[in-house]
């Protein structure tokens, strides 16, 4: 019998291993050039984003996700040899799964794995568990870095959660919180939008290695993905050809219905992907199912499951996209030997300015600024909501509103971050505005009867 395929990539190759409750989950990465800075900080950042947390409305499982590099990296740089990294599974509680040993959780991988292999690790879902995706952010971080150094940036944001249309990727929105509470323990699906900026024209190979095909395969390898679309996607089914075409002039594309890919090859426009996720299938309600002996039973799944995992899956999507793009770029290199170096040259400081597609680059950067501003204001709105909550508590317990020590403390914490581009005076000025409006809100609350 064939094994489960655990490998991905033609030239930048990854193999992941480990089950949800085995000793460790890990990845073997091959095809990485020597002398590349192995950015552990970026890996940690992505792992942090993928972790469960109350703020992300996920399971109460605590996963410390510490990486151990077994090979392929020396003095912080890649050796050009296979890189193996593991993460020990520490936060699992296999006893949660005792009652599920002989039962098939509806719509999880239990039934299909058992029927296919005649054996399954029922603890935590084994290889079908999204725990496996922790291994992917390690090569993901490598590829993200390699791409970012060449001006390619990937950003993913949750844009829909059930009935909730989200503002741009705002993770800690109160609306999300209160919406999830209305579900009474049920799980919920979501749509994530991924935008890839700065990819040059020419990546992807016809016909069976089309870039949209490769990206779809990569994204569909993530558990619970049920749909992937590019650009206008399923809306094309409602449009006339004349409505779907992306016109061009000397400055580039005038629209982006295609989502940045024509005939399986990147066209230089932003790549726009939407991914639909189902909600976790493990829910605490009674459902009809079968046991491994073929008998009907009622199952109720109580354990530590994600009621919503949209926010924690974005680093996994970004990783899979980055791995795919870097692999496709290496394939491109195969037909155009100097591609990577010419790609590097185009992005290097000595570039001939007349050759830069500055209008597209400007548009991309402006889009990025807008995204940043939206995030800043949504975060500010969240901060004011929190300030409101604090005043409610202070009011209830008769405490003073203003606490200048606390204000100084906050300012100092931010100053100690040593954010290079932000002078201390800017921190002082921004905080004075923030404090002013926080106080106004708090004052209104205090004055309310
Ligand atoms: C980040 C992430 C976390 C998940 N957490 C859970 C979970 O806690 N419980 C669960 O039943 N399914 C969870 N899932 C979904 C299952 O892994 C998935 O539904 C299962 O493997 C079956 O595969 P399919 O939905 O692609 O058919 C999660 C998926 C992702 C991407």
Image (spheres, rainbow, N blue to C red):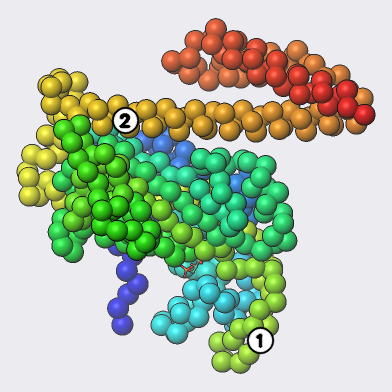
| x then y, percent, for residue 304 | 65, 61
Residue 436 seen from this side: yes
Residue denoted by label 1: 297
| Residue 340, above or below 437 | below
Q: How many marks?
A: 2
Q: Helix, strand, or loop for circle 2?
A: helix
Q: Which residue is pictured at 38% across the width and 32% down the height?
A: 367
> In front here: 226 or 270?
270
Q: Which residue is pictured at 64% across the width and 47% down the height?
A: 176
Label 2 or label 1, whichever comes before in sequence order? 1
> In front here: 422 or 42?
422
| x then y, percent, for residue 276 | 46, 59
Near mark 2 (Cα within 10 A), the count class, few <14, some 14-19 or many ≥20, is few
Residue 20 seen from this side: no
Find out whether the residues at labels 2 and 1 contact each other: C-beta distance under 8 Å: no
The reply, left or right, for residue 154 in relation to residue 403 is left
Image quarter (top left, top right, bottom left or bottom right) of the N terminus: bottom left
> In front here: 354 or 296?
354
| x then y, percent, for residue 436 | 70, 15
| x then y, percent, for residue 340 | 15, 39
Near mark 1 (Cα within 10 A), the count class, few <14, some 14-19 or many ≥20, is some
Residue 363 circle label = 2
Q: Which residue is pictured at 67% across the width and 42% down the height?
A: 174
Image quarter (top left, top right, bottom left or bottom right) of the C terminus: top right
| Residue 313, above or below 188 | above
When asked about the image quadrant of residue 414, the answer is top right
Q: Nearer the viewer, mark 2 or mark 1?
A: 2
The reply, left or right, for residue 303 in relation to residue 333 is right
């Amino acid at each position: 019998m064939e094994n489960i395929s655990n490998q991905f990539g033609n030239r930048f190759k990854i193999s992941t291993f480990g089950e949800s409750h085995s000793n460790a989950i890990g990845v073997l990465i091959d095809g990485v050039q020597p002398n590349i800075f192995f950015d552990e900080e970026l890996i940690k950042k992505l792992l942090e984003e993928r972790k469960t947390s109350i703020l992300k409305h996920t399971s109460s499982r605590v996963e410390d996700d510490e990486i151990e590099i077994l090979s392929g990296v020396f003095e912080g740089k890649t050796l050009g040899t296979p890189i193996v990294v593991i993460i020990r599974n520490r936060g699992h509680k296999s006893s949660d799964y005792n009652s599920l040993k002989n039962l098939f959780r509806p719509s999880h991988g239990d039934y299909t794995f058992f029927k296919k292999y005649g054996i399954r690790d029922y603890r935590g879902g084994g290889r079908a568990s999204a725990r496996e995706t922790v291994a992917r952010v390690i090569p993901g971080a490598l590829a993200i870095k390699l791409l970012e150094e060449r001006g390619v940036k990937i950003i993913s944001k949750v844009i829909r959660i059930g009935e909730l249309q989200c503002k741009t990727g705002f993770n800690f929105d109160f609306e999300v919180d209160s919406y999830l509470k209305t579900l009474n323990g049920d799980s919920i699906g979501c749509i994530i939008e991924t935008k890839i900026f700065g990819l040059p024209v020419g990546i992807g190979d016809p016909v069976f290695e089309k870039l949209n095909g490769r990206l779809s395969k990569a994204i569909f390898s993530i558990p619970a993905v049920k749909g992937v679309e590019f650009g206008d996607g399923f809306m094309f089914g409602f449009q006339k050809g004349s409505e779907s075409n992306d016109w061009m002039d000397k400055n580039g594309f005038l629209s982006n219905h295609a989502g940045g890919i024509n005939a399986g090859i990147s066209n230089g426009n932003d790549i726009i992907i939407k991914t639909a996720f189902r909600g976790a299938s493990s829910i605490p309600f009674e459902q009809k199912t079968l046991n491994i002996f073929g008998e009907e039973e009622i199952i109720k799944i109580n354990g530590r499951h994600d009621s919503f995992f949209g926010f924690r899956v974005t680093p996994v999507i970004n990783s899979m996209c980055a791995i795919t793009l870097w692999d496709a770029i290496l394939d491109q290199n195969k037909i155009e030997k100097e591609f990577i170096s010419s790609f590097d040259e185009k992005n290097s400081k000595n570039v001939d300015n007349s050759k830069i597609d500055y209008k597209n680059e400007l548009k991309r950067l402006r889009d990025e600024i807008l995204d940043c501003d939206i995030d800043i204001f949504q975060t500010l709105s969240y901060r004011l909501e929190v300030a409101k909550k604090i005043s409610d508590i202070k009011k209830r317990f008769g405490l003073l509103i203003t606490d200048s020590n606390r204000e100084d403390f906050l300012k100092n914490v931010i100053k100690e971050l040593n954010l290079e581009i932000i002078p201390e005076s800017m921190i002082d000025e921004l905080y004075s505005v923030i404090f002013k409006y926080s106080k106004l809100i708090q004052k209104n609350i205090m004055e309310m009867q």
